Amino acid sequence: MAEQREMKEKNPWHRPVIICITVFIAMGVITLVAMAVVQNKPLHQKYKYGIVLDAGSSHTSVYIYEWPAEKENNTGMVRQTHACNVKGKGISSYAWNISYAGMSLRECMEEAKEKIPVWRHPETPVYLGATAGMRLLRMFNAAVSDQVLSSVERFLQTYPFLYQGARIISGQEEGAYGWITVNYLNGNFRKALTTMGALDLGGASTQITFVSKQEVESEENSMLFRLYGNDYHVYTHSFLCYGKDQALKLALAKQLQTGESQLRDPCFHPGYIEQKSLASSPCVPETRPHDSERTFTHTGTGNASLCQEVVKRIFNFTHCPWGRCSFNGVFQPPVEGQFGAFSAFYFVMNFLNLTSDSLEQSKLKMDHYCSTPWAEIKQRYPSVKQKYLAEYCFSGTYILTLLENGYNFTSENWKDIQFIKKIGDSDAGWTLGYMLNLTNMIPAEAPDEPPLPHGGYVAIMVLFSLFIFILFLLAYKLFGRPVCNANKQII
Ligand SMILES: O=c1[nH]cnc2c1ncn2[C@@H]1O[C@H](COP(=O)(O)OP(=O)(O)O)[C@@H](O)[C@H]1O
Ligand SMILES: [Ca+2]
């Protein structure tokens, strides 16, 4: 007994002070590793900002984007933090009131000044891109469209941001940047996944953009992007005058061709009656000289199938100089894959509750909706803007016709169209893609990334420290006593 006690006392592992020291060392290792790892993380995320103004035909929106400053070239980092709708109409409507075009942006730009930290103002880029409304104005009167752009330019330059220009973007750019936006936000580039097509419906133009495995026969519809180490052969087309507001003008002009002053229109609800005039625009050329403002009485008859016949007449399906066409002699390969349909595609289909219906169900619902009397519609939706409300029967029918007869979607692939407004926090639209491109934020080649994300690295370090600690304990249990026993045998 006395020998045993002596042995225990000689074995240092049996002393409580040594046990305590071991535990403290192990805990110290864990704490040190954890602290070193946490300390390596940047102190706090510093954000950078960018502002893009979408000067559309119907109105202007101001978008603010932010991204972590040290992750500028990592794709998937940019997100929309704020959107502001400019009151009033689009900048092209200031053609005869030019000095107010810039001033109209004041409220939203003041908001941007408040939302972005002051110290970031001088390095925050501001871009303005104008779309089909300004394209039409330029066709109508190039000098006036230049003056409108100068007015907004002068105004934007009074702000403390880094002004990067105001210009009319091409239809090709509008389509391509919309496609970049939806695929960037869905993380498709980073993961080298198959991409999603983009369908954008505005007031004055509409865009279709998707990756096609088939050859793109017409050069003007073909774009090549190298993003994140992958090549994308993209088909894109923008139809000027086929946004929903100009398409309505085309449909009215077609029906007014007979020269009557009374128009009985199946695309408007029964009981709808308004005095209107149809001003000539580059989309609706004057059919008769000296007849630039045709006034007429517009009455609704509410019949969706007849409306579809009217809408079909604004497309030319017979002339096609290529292997295959969408309409108006424009080449289009067969649609393939998933599509995101945004802006007015979403507003209209969402209002009509058609975002998750089949093509057949959508047509049946449109029959019912269009034949509902105007008085009942107004009563049912008292808070909806009357201009939108009056036009939803036309707009819904136009969308179904454009997608089915124009782009050749079928009952089978209708489910591949997702009507979307936002992806995460960011609106689907061309603006984000535009900014990503101009700031070179999507690299052509994939940058080298650390093998582990920061969180995973911390977890592994802590687990390893724990593992070492447990090994210490085990070693004590296993080797502490046997040493005594061995000594006993020798004795
Ligand atoms: O809440 C809504 N309901 C229906 N249509 C809407 C709503 N908000 C916007 N819109 C429509 O979306 C379209 C937006 O077009 P935009 O102004 O972007 O023209 P653009 O892209 O052809 O230049 C317009 O036709 C506008 O009337
Ligand atoms: Ca638009």
Image (cartoon, rainbow, N blue to C red):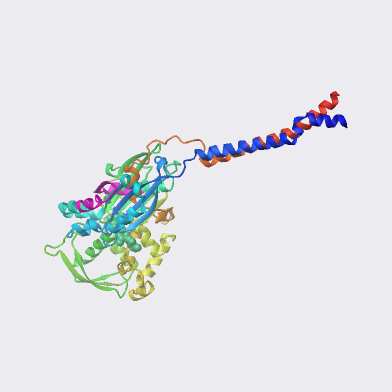
Q: 356 or 266: nearer the eye? A: 356
Q: Nearer the viewer, residue 359 or 134?
A: 134
Q: Is residue 336 visible?
A: no
Task: Tell me the magenta residue range.
Answer: 150-178
Q: Is residue 175 magenta?
A: yes
Q: For residue 98, what is the image quadrant?
A: bottom left
Work out whether residue 173 can be spotted: yes
**Which image quadrant: the N terminus?**
top right
The structure residue drawn at horizontal position 16% and vertical position 51%, both measured from the top left corner, is 142
Residue 265: percent from the left, percent from the top?
A: 27, 69
Q: Residue 9's spot in the image, x, y percent? A: 80, 31
Between 424 and 410, the one nearer to me in the picture: 424
Quadrant of the picture in which ligand 1 is shown: bottom left
In the image, taking residue 353 as reference, residue 261 lies left or right, namely left
Identified at 36% across, 61% down, the residue is: 347
Total numbered labels placed on residues in the image: 0
Q: Residue 213 falls in which quadrant of the image?
A: top left
Residue ranking furthest to the left: 290
Where residue 491 sits: x, y (%)? 86, 24
Q: Answer above or below: position of 178 versus 473.
A: below
Residue lying furthest top:
490
Magenta highlight on residue 301? no
Q: Nearer the viewer, residue 56 or 106?
A: 106
Q: Which residue is rendered at x = 17% and y = 67% of the image?
A: 294
- 7 over 79 or under it: above or below: above
Residue 95 left/right relative to 416: left
